[in-house]
Image (cartoon, helix red, strand yellow):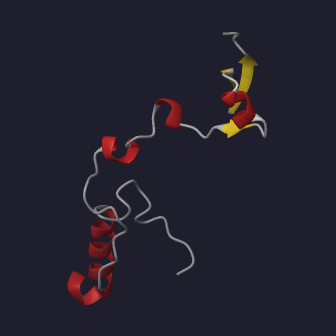
Amino acid sequence: KRYTTLGMATDQGRNSNVTGLAIMAEVSGRTIPQTGTTIYRPPQVPVAIGALAGHHRDEKFHSTRLTPSHRWAAERGAVFVDTGLWKRAQWYPLP
């Protein structure tokens, strides 16, 4: 099998392949179990979107890149600003 569009919907073949199997069984003069079924791709059961998102929100939503001098700046009390994915020292407050 080199190419197929059957089973490529959001259900990954869980529901749409049943129709295809029924057609193939009818054309070949056999039953669906005789024709054979496909292997379903996981997840086979619905998963709550919150379980997929998990802790990936706010600061953890995207990767953060640090400059080579980040630790040095943090030790000196730098206030950082987001510039794209980078955390850059914006200023160093005086005590």
Would you place residue 35 above or below residue 38 in this image? below
Q: Quadrant of residue 82?
A: top right
Residue ID at (63%, 37%): 64
The residue shown at (73%, 23%) is 89
8 vs 77: above or below? below
Q: Nearer the viewer, residue 31 or 3?
A: 3
Q: Position of residue 54 (x, y in %)?
A: 37, 43
Image quarter for residue 76? top right
Q: Position of residue 12 (x, y in %)?
A: 38, 62
Compared to residue 23, the image places residue 43 above or below, namely above
Q: Is 17 on the left-hand or right-hand side of 66?
A: left
The answer to whether one can see residue 42 in this image is yes
Q: Residue furthest right?
A: 68
Residue plotted at (55% across, 73% down): 3
Across and down, in percent, residue 81 comes to 67, 20
42 and 54: which is toward the camera: 54
Across and down, in percent, residue 26 comes to 27, 80
The image shows residue 95, relative to residue 28, as above or below, that is above
**Dividing the picture into quarters, in which one does residue 37 lie?**
bottom left
Judge left or right: residue 1 versus residue 54: right
